[in-house]
Structure formats: C-alpha cells, structure tokens
C-alpha cells in the first residue's frame, strides 16, 4: 500500500501564492501518475492537475496559467505551485497517486486546507 502525506496548505490573501507538497511512502511501486484534486464545500472533487512519471502534465481549466505541478520521481514527491490565488480556489486539496497496469490502483492523501481570503 502507498501512503500519501500532504503539507503546505494555509491561509493566503487573494493574489498570493502557496506551494503544496506530497510525499509517498510505504510499499513504493512505480507510480505512474501523481496529481492534485480539490473539493470545496458542497461541490464535487475536481482535478487540479496531474503529472506522469515522464513529466507530461494535465490541468483543470480553472487553474491553467496560474498553477504549476512538478514531480521528483526519486523522492516519490509531487508539488503544486499555486500563484495568483483567488477566493474560489478555497478548498481541501488532496494528493493522489496511481500505479499498476492501466493505473488500476490508487491512493489518496488526507487532504490539506487552502483558504484564500482577505
């Protein structure tokens, strides 16, 4: 099993920046995709961005141009640099890892709160 631990959330003013980190531990296998999702109160969980082991990235439309996802394969870590934050970015952010054939296996972190408010 793969455990994911997120860090870096907090309170930031509109227009500010935050950097989230997530490190995988446990029975580490070759993780194909690592990514970030978020869930605001009363809303469904949505993709923020993900990145393959080869470095290909994919972003949700609402964060394109503001957020950047990166990955350190050697450390089994994924990062999310969030710039130009808006109040609507307020949510719990979850780290996700997928591995196995056709990404059949998945694990989630416990989530970290990001609040954008003046």
Image (tube, rainbow, N blue to C red):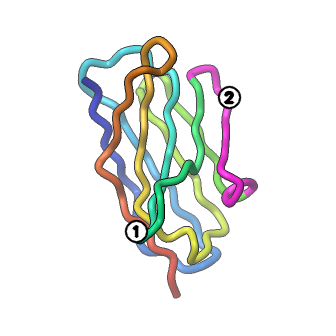
Q: Quadrant of residue 3?
A: top left
Is residue 61 on the magenta stretch? yes
Is residue 28 on the magenta stretch? no
**Most distant residue in the right direction:** 65
Q: Are marks 1 and 2 in contact (CB under 8 Å)?
A: no
**Residue 89 x %, y %:** 55, 68
**Label 1: which secondary element:** strand
Q: Quadrant of residue 115?
A: bottom left
The residue indicated by pointer 2 is 56
| Residue plotted at (52% across, 28% down) | 33
Considering the image in quadrants, where does the N terminus appear? top left
Q: Earlier in the sequence, mark 1 or mark 2?
A: 1
89 lies left or right of 106: right
| Residue plotted at (65% across, 51% down) | 60
The answer to whether 32 is drawn above or below residue 17 in the figure is: above
The residue indicated by pointer 1 is 10
* Dot 2 alpha-carbon crowd within 10 angstroms: few under 14, some 14 to 19, many 20 or more: few
**Label 2: which secondary element:** loop
**Most distant residue in the top direction:** 101
The answer to whether 71 is drawn above or below residue 40 in the figure is: above
* Dot 1 alpha-carbon crowd within 10 angstroms: few under 14, some 14 to 19, many 20 or more: some
- Specify start and end residues of the magenta stretch as a single range: 53-65
| Residue plotted at (67% across, 39% down) | 58
* Distance of label 1 from label 2 (alpha carbons): 28 Å
60 lies left or right of 39: right
| Residue plotted at (42% across, 32% down) | 97
**Residue 117 x %, y %:** 50, 82
Q: In front here: 31 or 84?
A: 31
């Amino acid at each position: 099993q793969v455990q994911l631990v997120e860090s870096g959330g907090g309170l930031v003013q509109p227009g500010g920046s935050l950097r989230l980190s997530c490190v995988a531990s446990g029975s580490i296998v070759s993780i194909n995709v690592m990514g970030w999702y978020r869930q605001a109160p009363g809303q469904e969980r949505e993709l923020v961005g993900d990145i393959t082991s080869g470095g290909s990235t994919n972003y949700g439309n609402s964060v394109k141009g503001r957020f950047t996802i990166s990955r350190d394969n050697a450390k089994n870590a994924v990062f999310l640099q969030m710039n130009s934050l808006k109040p609507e970015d307020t949510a719990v952010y979850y780290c996700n890892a997928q591995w196995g054939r056709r990404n059949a296996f998945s694990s989630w972190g416990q989530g970290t709160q990001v609040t954008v408010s003046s």
